[in-house]
């Protein structure tokens, strides 16, 4: 079984990675480090020479670059595609929609200082991304976040149905190992059901650097379901004492 590593230091002992060609979920409360882990996953692939794509549905590329400028991650060769819901209000459902303007991903190192907005609804977003996936094959894709996707829905479409349809679209067209990010909500049951793996990031009380990675669902055997992580300038790593204790016990 081929796996795409999450890129977290020492994580492979516990989580070998994401099964290639699958869609997976990472969710948790605000500030738990979901976007950092997602970007770390892409950075690891970029270091291996893979084509990787970050789809931002709640921030511009300029804002994303600023958020990560103080982290020691290889971001230059990560492609980024950003989109915003149509500002003029929820669009009416039409039999045929034109995607205007056409939007393409650019590499993080090519992002300028000016904010550029690609306005879309669910249908035009999917049409544009289909074109993106047809033009280039990305080994890894991160979608940040499907929670924001709910603001892209049109009149006559249920927002949750739109989210579910978008996930099915990713399964059909991306041909990538996808990590989808979501905020911590109770109504993620439908999304979880079609995911290959599901991870939850849990904030440790009274700490800004300690996070627990909880494996809720996976296609691989997992000996530990709650893995303590520590955040550094190089991204997340497994808490060293926990890692060494586990390795010694396995080797005994």
Image (cartoon, helix red, strand yellow):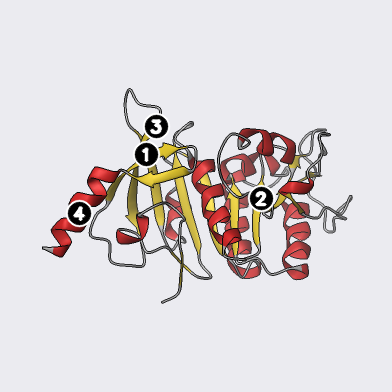
Q: Pick whichever of labels 4 and 3 is earlier in the sequence.
A: 3
In the displayed structure image, the side of residue 34 where residue 229 appears, left or right:
left
Q: Residue at x 78, y 43 (%)?
A: 111
Q: Earlier in the sequence, mark 4 or mark 2?
A: 2
Which of the numbered marks, if any, corresponds to residue 209? 3
Residue at 76% in and 54% down? 105
The kind of secondary structure element at disc 2 is: strand
Q: Could you give the CA–CA distance between mark 4 and mark 3, rounded to whole angstroms? A: 21 Å
> Secondary structure beneath disc 4?
helix
Q: Which residue is mark 4?
A: 246
CB within 8 Å, label 4 to label 2: no
Question: Which dot, 1 or 2, sits closer to the camera?
Answer: 1
The reply to whether callout 4 and callout 3 are in contact (CB within 8 Å) is no
**First-in-chain label (1 vs 2):** 2
Please state which of the two labelled residues, at mark 2 or mark 3, is closer to the viewer: 3
Q: Which residue is mark 1?
A: 230
- State the image coordinates of residue 194 (x, y, percent, origin top left): 47, 61
Mark 2 / mark 3, whichever is N-terminal: 2
Q: In the displayed orientation, state which residue is furthest to the left.
A: 252
Disc 1 crowd rating (10 Å Cα; few below 14, some 14-19, many 20+) is: some
Q: Nearer the viewer, residue 192 or 231?
A: 231
Q: Are marks 3 and 1 in contact (CB under 8 Å)?
A: yes
């Amino acid at each position: 079984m081929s796996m795409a590593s999450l890129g977290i230091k020492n994580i492979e002992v516990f989580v070998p990675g994401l099964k290639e060609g699958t869609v997976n979920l990472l969710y948790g409360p605000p500030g738990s480090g979901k976007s950092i882990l997602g970007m770390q996953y892409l950075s690891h692939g970029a270091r291996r020479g893979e084509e990787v794509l970050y789809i931002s549905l709640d921030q511009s590329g300029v804002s994303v670059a600023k958020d990560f400028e103080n982290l020691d991650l290889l971001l230059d060769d990560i492609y980024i595609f950003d989109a915003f819901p149509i500002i003029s209000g929820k669009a009416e459902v039409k039999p045929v929609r034109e995607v205007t303007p056409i939007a393409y991903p650019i590499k993080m190192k090519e992002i300028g200082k000016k904010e550029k907005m690609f306005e879309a609804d669910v249908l035009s977003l999917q049409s544009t991304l289909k074109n993106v996936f047809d033009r280039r094959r990305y080994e890894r894709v991160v979608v940040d976040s499907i929670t924001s996707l709910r603001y892209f829905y049109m009149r006559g479409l249920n927002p949750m149905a739109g989210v579910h349809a978008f996930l099915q679209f990713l399964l059909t067209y991306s041909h990538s190992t996808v990590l989808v990010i979501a905020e911590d909500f109770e109504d993620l049951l439908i999304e979880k059901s079609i995911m290959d793996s599901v991870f939850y990031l849990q904030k440790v009380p009274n700490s800004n650097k300690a996070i627990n990675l909880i494996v809720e669902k996976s296609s691989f055997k997992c000996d530990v379901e709650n893995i303590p992580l520590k955040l550094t300038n190089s991204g997340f790593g497994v808490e060293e004492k926990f890692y060494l204790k586990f390795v010694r016990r396995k080797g005994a």
